[in-house]
Image (tube, helix red, strand yellow):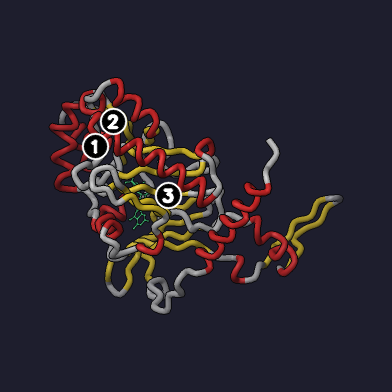
């Protein structure tokens, strides 16, 4: 279908908006990484071009994640024009070079978790994983007591909902206490390009921890997130619903209900069938059976040293 001038204009303003937001980022004068002492590498991946490091900042445990970001189309010509090229080899029609880009086109996305708990360190440590099948009864007997005592703090979520953090990053908010939510960029997305678009919708209500708690009572909440989340992303970034993967994680890391909105083109961590549950499937399952997620077995992966895995083993479920 031919692209209208309106479409093109919308895309232009969306890219401008992204660039503006990206460029507006605060300069951190107090760098937590300059004092970082490396203890060990938790994980690294040459293909994904990232590295997860455990270390100390001023005596406190910290995790630092470094990730090379995708090459941006809108800065391509500047990159090609203003970089230095160093020839590595030449053979017939083939030649390879090292391209030295100007600093502002050569940024590394950096995430710092400090102080980091042992659980943060384990989350990023490369480990063998096992698939567990959890019945509704297993959830109540094994998983629920475990997550009630062991799960990650959701303080960062409350900070967002109460506008104590990331308030300027909120893209959309429906303030309704029952069906409302906040939509904002996930911290995995630097907002510089749309290929890896990643936003999260965090619900205002605090009594729904995960997929397991959902019943047909929550359908108005879920349909509201789907329609307003998709509309906002279409309007703000020019990405239509047909280009989005919208899903829950089970198990999530953070037990306060939230929905992941990612670009369909982006192979986001945790978007595989063993962890992701499409919002549209969840809505249909609840329409057909209100207790669907209370009763059915759900499979998910657990890392070798996860205490929950040990509980499943002890109960003879693995
Ligand atoms: P999850 O399914 O509970 O856990 O999703 P996961 O991290 O194992 O996927 C939580 C989502 O929230 C993830 O996509 C995180 O990248 C994102 N996230 C986590 N934290 C601590 C923050 C934060 O402080 N701000 C924002 N904007 N996103 C976060």
Q: Residue at x 30, y 39 (%)?
A: 221
- Residue beneath disc 1: 309
**In the displayed structure, does residue 305 sit left or right of residue 72?**
left
Tell me: residue 285, above or below residue 233: above
Element under disc 3: strand
Give the image location of residue 17, x and y in percent: 54, 60
The answer to the question of whether label 2 and label 1 lie on touching residues, with beta carbons closer than 8 A, is yes
Q: Position of residue 203 (x, y in %)?
A: 29, 47
Give the structural element (helix, strand or loop) at label 1: helix
Q: Is mark 2 within 8 Å of ligand 1?
A: no
Disc on the earlier residue, 2 or 1: 2
Q: Say few, some or many: other residues with alpha carbon within 10 Å of mark 3 (under 14 / 14 to 19 / 20 or more).
A: many
Q: Is residue 202 left or right of residue 44?
A: left
Asked if residue 199 is positioned above or below residue 31 in the image, the reply reads above
Circle number at residue 286: none
Mark 2 in CB contact with mark 3 (< 8 angstroms): no
Q: Which residue is mark 2?
A: 132
The residue positioned 33% from the left and 62% from the top of the image is 113
Q: Are marks 3 and 1 in contact (CB under 8 Å)?
A: no
Q: Nearer the viewer, residue 100 or 244?
A: 244
Give the mark nearer the N terminus: 3 vs 1.
Answer: 3
Q: Which residue is mark 3?
A: 199
Is the CB of mark 3 within 8 Å of ligand 1?
no
Q: Could you tell me which quadrant the C terminus lies in?
A: top left
State which tag comes first along the sequence, 2 or 3. Answer: 2
């Amino acid at each position: 279908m031919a692209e209208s001038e309106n479409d093109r204009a919308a895309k232009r303003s969306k890219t401008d908006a992204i660039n503006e937001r990206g460029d507006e980022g605060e300069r951190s004068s107090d760098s937590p990484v300059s004092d970082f002492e490396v203890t060990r590498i938790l994980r690294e991946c040459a293909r994904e071009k990232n590295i997860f490091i455990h270390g100390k900042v001023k005596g406190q445990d910290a995790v630092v994640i470094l990730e090379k970001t995708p090459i941006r189309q809108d800065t391509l010509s500047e990159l090609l024009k203003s970089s230095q090229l160093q020839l590595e080899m030449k053979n017939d029609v083939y030649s390879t070079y090292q391209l030295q880009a100007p600093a502002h086109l050569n940024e590394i996305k950096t995430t710092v978790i400090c102080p980091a708990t042992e659980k943060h360190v384990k989350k990023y440590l490369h480990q063998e994983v096992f698939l567990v099948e959890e019945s509704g009864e297993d959830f109540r007997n094994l998983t629920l007591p475990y997550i009630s005592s062991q799960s990650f703090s959701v303080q960062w979520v409350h900070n967002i909902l109460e506008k104590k953090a990331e308030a300027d990053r909120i893209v959309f908010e429906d303030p309704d206490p029952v069906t409302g939510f906040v939509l904002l960029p996930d911290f995995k997305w630097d907002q510089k390009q749309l290929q890896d678009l990643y936003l999260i919708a965090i619900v205002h209500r605090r009594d729904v921890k995960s997929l397991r708690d959902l019943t047909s009572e929550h359908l108005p909440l879920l349909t509201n997130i789907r329609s307003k989340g998709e509309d906002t992303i279409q309007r703000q970034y020019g990405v239509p619903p047909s280009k989005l993967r919208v899903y829950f994680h089970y198990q999530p890391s953070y037990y306060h209900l939230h929905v992941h909105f990612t670009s369909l083109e982006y192979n986001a961590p945790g978007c595989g069938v063993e962890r992701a549950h499409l919002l549209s499937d969840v809505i249909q399952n609840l329409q057909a059976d209100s207790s669907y997620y209370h009763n059915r077995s759900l499979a998910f992966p657990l890392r070798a040293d996860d205490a929950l895995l040990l509980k499943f083993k002890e109960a003879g479920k693995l």
